[in-house]
């Protein structure tokens, strides 16, 4: 019974509260696990989900693995190999850093972490509804395998999920890593590791990649103040979408929400976009880690930039210059109605859940 006296919450309750912020829906679980695999320098990541991730999410990678001695710690809150002191927060080079994902997932599911670092034996540990089991030997290839079963089954109703997991964005940000995503037995994304980013662009965006043009900032921007650079691809103005879902923004390799960039992007297109339409774009911002604060959002979807105005203006100029220096196609070659048939892979939400 609630009383009006203040008491310190127990660890488990604290964990449940924290878990609600980190993993609200299956897509966020997938995102966290994929980011762990990328941080572990994997060159291949396999993802399998069943029933939108609520029944099963399984991720296996061929990365560095987790030492047997560290396995139980990996499941604790605020236990991480990516950060050791507060000052490290100023220059985060990994996608994860808070040490909260596995602990949170283990609070709201039946989580099995199995890992085999190079030259070691495979070991696994289970965490169910916040309780850790014992370490057991397991046969497996080098790397890490994470299994999440019955996600949120111990929770009050959770948001059904609206989007496919952010795998596209990760595939676009890490072209040297191969990805395979299976949903209810069906392969949804299967892209081999490649040295050439343009290959990856074709593999993820499909046909529409042919309509993308290289971002080409004005030469004068090389002398502009600031250490940031924008590269990437934008669609010609005849390729548009009703929503900004096909705008991927990657900051130092981290996929972030495109929303804060939409206005600058539209301005860069000048009058070329119809009202309410958005282009397709993959925009990569590289800047010193000290210019970005990644620790501002529970799911790290948003970051804070020290010089956001300057960065946005640079983006706008880069887009404007790209379009000015690209001859536009005659009207007849690109019927605007063709846009809805673009990129069958991402045109419909693959992880629909009823
Ligand atoms: P964070 O990524 O913020 O460190 P997590 O809870 O996601 O926190 O993971 C905790 C720790 O477990 C990581 O710091 C890492 O050392 C280890 N880990 C998790 N997933 C993997 C993986 N796929 N490969 C290797 N190590 C992993
Ligand atoms: Mg992590």
Image (cartoon, rainbow, N blue to C red):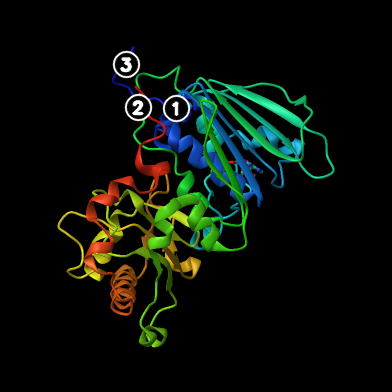
Q: Position of residue 153 (x, y in %)?
A: 45, 17
What residue sits 34% from the left and 75% below the top? 322
Query: Would residue 123 appear left or right of 298 to someone viewing this image?
Result: right
Q: Position of residue 326 (x, y in %)?
A: 33, 76
The residue pinned by badge 3 equals 2
Q: Residue furthest top?
A: 1
The residue pinned by badge 1 equals 52
Q: Position of residue 121 (x, y in %)?
A: 82, 35
Examine the rendering and report whether any part of residue 258 can be seen: yes
Q: Are marks 1 and 2 in contact (CB under 8 Å)?
A: yes
What residue sits 44% from the left and 77% below the top? 227
Q: Nearer the viewer, residue 23 or 195?
A: 195
Residue 16 quadrant = top left
Ligand 1 shows up in which quadrant of the image? top right
What residue sits 28% from the left and 69% below the top? 329
Q: Position of residue 321 (x, y in %)?
A: 31, 78
Residue 291 quadrant = bottom left
Mark whose residue sits in front, 3 or 2:
2
The residue pinned by badge 2 equals 160
The relative height of residue 333 versus residue 307 in the rendered view (above or below) is above
Residue 156 quadrant = top left
The relative height of residue 41 versus residue 189 in the rendered view (above or below) is below
Report the Cα–Cα distance between label 1 and label 3.
36 Å
- Provide the secondary structure element on which disc 2 rests: loop
Q: Nearer the viewer, residue 133 or 60?
A: 60
Q: Residue furthest right?
A: 119
Mark whose residue sits in front, 1 or 2:
1
Image quarter in which the N terminus is found: top left
- Category of crowding for the residue at label 2, using alpha-carbon neighbours closer than 10 angstroms: few (below 14), some (14–19), many (at least 20): some
């Amino acid at each position: 019974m609630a009383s009006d006296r203040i008491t310190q919450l127990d660890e488990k309750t604290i964990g449940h509260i924290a878990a609600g912020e980190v993993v609200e829906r299956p897509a966020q679980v997938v995102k966290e696990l994929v980011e762990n695999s990328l941080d572990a320098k994997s060159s291949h990541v396999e993802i399998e989900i069943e029933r939108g991730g609520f029944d099963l999410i399984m991720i296996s990678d061929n990365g560095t693995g987790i030492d047997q001695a560290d396995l139980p710690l990996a499941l604790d809150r605020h236990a991480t190999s990516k950060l050791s002191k507060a000052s490290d927060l100023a220059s985060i080079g990994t996608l994860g850093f808070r040490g909260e994902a596995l602990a949170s997932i283990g609070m709201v599911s039946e989580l099995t972490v199995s890992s085999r670092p190079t030259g070691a034996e495979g070991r696994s540990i289970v965490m169910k509804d916040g309780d850790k089991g014992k370490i057991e030997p397991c046969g497996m290839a080098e790397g890490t395998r994470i299994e999440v079963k019955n996600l949120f089954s111990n929770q009050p109703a959770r948001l059904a999920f609206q989007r496919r997991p952010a795998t596209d964005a990760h595939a676009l940000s890490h072209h040297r890593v191969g990805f395979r995503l299976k949903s209810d037995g069906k392969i949804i994304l299967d892209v081999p590791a490649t040295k050439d980013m343009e290959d990856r662009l074709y593999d993820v965006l499909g046909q529409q990649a042919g309509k993308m043009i290289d971002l080409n900032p004005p030469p004068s921007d090389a002398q502009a103040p600031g250490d940031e650079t924008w590269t990437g691809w934008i669609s010609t103005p005849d390729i548009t979408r009703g929503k900004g879902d096909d705008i991927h923004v990657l900051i130092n390799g981290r996929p972030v929400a495109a929303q804060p960039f939409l206005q600058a992007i539209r301005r860069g297109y000048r009058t070329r976009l119809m009202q309410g339409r958005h282009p397709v774009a993959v925009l990569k911002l590289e800047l010193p880690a000290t210019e970005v604060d990644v620790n501002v959002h529970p799911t790290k979807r948003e970051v804070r930039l020290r010089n956001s105005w300057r960065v946005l203006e640079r983006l706008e100029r880069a887009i404007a210059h790209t379009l000015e220096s690209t001859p536009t196609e005659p009207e007849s070659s690109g019927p605007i109605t063709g846009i809805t048939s673009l990129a069958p892979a991402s045109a419909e939400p693959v992880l629909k859940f009823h």
